[in-house]
Amino acid sequence: MYHVVIPKIGAATAWRTAARGFLAAQIPPHEICWQEPGTAPELFAHTQALPPTGDIKVSRRFVAMANSVVWHRDRDRFAHLYGFLWRLRDAPHLIGDHGDPHLARLRRMEKNVHRCQHKMKAFVRFREIGDPEAPRRSFAAWFEPTHHTVEPTASFFARRFGDMDWRIITPDKTAICVDGVVSFSAGQARPDLPEDAHEDLWIAYFENIFNPARLKVSAMCSEMPKKYWKNLPEAVAIPNLVKTAPERAEKMARAAPTLPPLRAERMKERLAQGNATDGALPSQTSAPRQRK
Amino acid sequence: MTVKRKLEILSDAAKYDASCASSGSSKRDSRDGKGLGSNEGSGICHAYAPDGRCISLLKILMTNFCVYDCSYCVNRVSSNVPRARFTVDEVVDLTINFYRRNYIEGLFLSSGIIRSPDATMADMVRIARRLRKEESFRGYIHLKTIPDAAPELIAEAGLLADRLSINVELPTDAAVEAYAPEKSPEQIRGAMADVRHRKDAAQDRSHRGRRPPRFAPAGQSTQMIIGADGATDKTILGRSTRLYGDYKLKRVYYSAFSPIPDSSAKLPLISPPLQREHRLYQADWLLRFYGFELDEITSTTRDGNLDLAVDPKLAWALEHRALFPVDVNKAPKELLLRVPGFGVKTAKRIVSTRRHCYLRYDHLLRIGGAMKKAQPFIVAGGWSPGSLTDSACLRARFAPSPEQLTLF
């Protein structure tokens, strides 16, 4: 029995190196025990030295899939991947067989990871932790992804936020980017990030871009599942928006049409004469006149 | 007035623009450390409002002062909504600071018409120029173009922005003239044609083989309001088919006419026809990605409107049962695309998988077809619909059950 521990950081490379060695040495899946760090070694598992890594030929589509599946939360992901890789030796066409249950399961895991990465790109919310006037501004975020997606997603943030330093802290892993160089360290508990005044503006935007006449809570929840809400600043506004929406829509429908403000006539005349001037006229605060 | 108050007013005024796309532009990033932002092809929806719409861009009006009097619009000159106006600095600052906190993909800037169309457009272009040149912003910018603005302003806008859009507003010219008296449908179409020509011209290489800078790389889009006038779905889809063809639009957005604060007496306030909007989008997709012709979809409509109870593809299949059931192991891809419950991805997967094995019903489940819907229309290993395909009550399986009318 072989016993491999795949580290948390660099799991993709570690798994690939190990799998390459096993496959080159023709070790079948049932002789390998794949483990995450920190789990107790299996009873009676006596460890053999791993075979040296070898050269093997595998479909590019498998490699792309494996590079995502290794970040899944499922403890058995490494074994599943190797099991399928073993089957691919004699039947390389299996990688394109959408009817195969084993592949279907791996594809489902791949999809879970992709979705988790996508949601991470969308829902990480930075707060400024440094001086806003500094040449390189610095930001930090606390995030709780469903899968181990910090490492494969960090490069996205590096490509996007090239002129600032940032860190994304999760319970499982921390990604830090300083001067464009990304590094990873162990996970941390939720830190106390300083208040950020722009959060207030963002919530104001979120509240006002919502149209109360089109309330569709289930559509929102399917794309922005509730598990993410605790780390989204704008989510605090949701309950009240949902509660007041029917009433607001009804109020709009019931309100009697008002008379146009005084400036409307003047501006229409000017427009007709072809010399419209600035619309910023002082009547902006006057109360609407009700049509009797 | 504080920036927060302005943001409240000017985002409230912008919410009736349906587009929030941030996809399909040129690829770029800021790995060089000299700028901010990236664009990687697919857009990202950073939040969802309780109306189920995604929030991808900071969608605001530069100002909601407007000299026009379009009845359907919350910002028309005769409306009593509170008014505000952003300065160039304020818009730039909000965009950059929201972007750095990962709230948005970029900016969608629209505006009421103040002073003159040229002056308004010039201010919008100034904001885009500041973002691109001074802030080195590489995120997404969508500018709503003013139809009668000067050509050189449109030319500059196209070089700075990822997408330009001009709203056709309503499905027919008659409706535009009735409800948006200051706007001219010919002028709107002229402006769309101008954007198309500039975009086409930017594809041509010079005699040295060099490409000119790209013009509006994410293309142009438009929006029309549904349900404010009496246009039928047939008219609407006919109009959008011509728009896609004539101006190479990336998208036509349909926006269900929705009650607005301080509405005009000219238009009735009804609850927005959301289901109709949904069916129009489905038909739009069938036309663009499923190989349907316009008259195939409109032939199934009664009185010119799509069936609200079942989707347009199912409605078509129910009328053309002689073509079904389709054998998933033999049928060409074009026919697979016509099966209700099969999408573009499913059809592609069926074609690639059946090279290796004979497809059975449970294969299709794994491939990801919506099998409940597809059942009556297909034959696969271990599955035959029998008389189901031709049964008289097939429509009733899919349509929502009829509701008891209330007496009050």
Image (tube, rainbow, N blue to C red):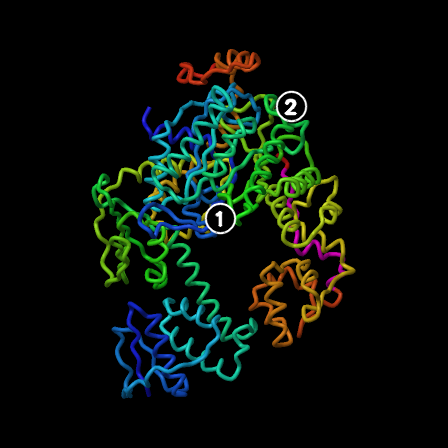
Q: Amino acid at mark 2?
A: Ala
Is residue A147 or residue B156 the one in the foreground? B156
Rounded to the nearest whole Å, what is the CA distance between mark 2 and mark 1? 35 Å
Q: Is residue A222 visible?
A: no
Asked if residue B304 is positioned above or below residue B84 in the image, the reply reads below
In the image, A197 versus B38, the foreground residue is: B38
Asked which quadrant contains residue B220, the reply is top right
Give the residue displayed 40% in from the left and 32% down from the top.
Answer: B127
B397 in magenta = yes
Instruction: Tell me where residue B10 sits by quadrant.
Output: top left
Instruction: Name the amino acid, label 1.
Output: Ser
In the picture of the structure, the residue carrying the numbered disc 1 is: B23
Q: Is residue B206 magenta?
A: no
For the residue pair A174 and B231, the one nearer the viewer reads as: A174
In the displayed structure, A246 sits above or below B278; it is above
Image position, residue A15 (x, y; %)? 35, 75
Does the image show residue B348? yes
* Residue B178 image label: 2
* Horizontal side, residue A251 vs residue B100: left or right: right
Say if A22 sits above or below B122 in the image: below
Q: How many marks?
A: 2
- Please identify the residue farthest to the front as the structure is shown: B208
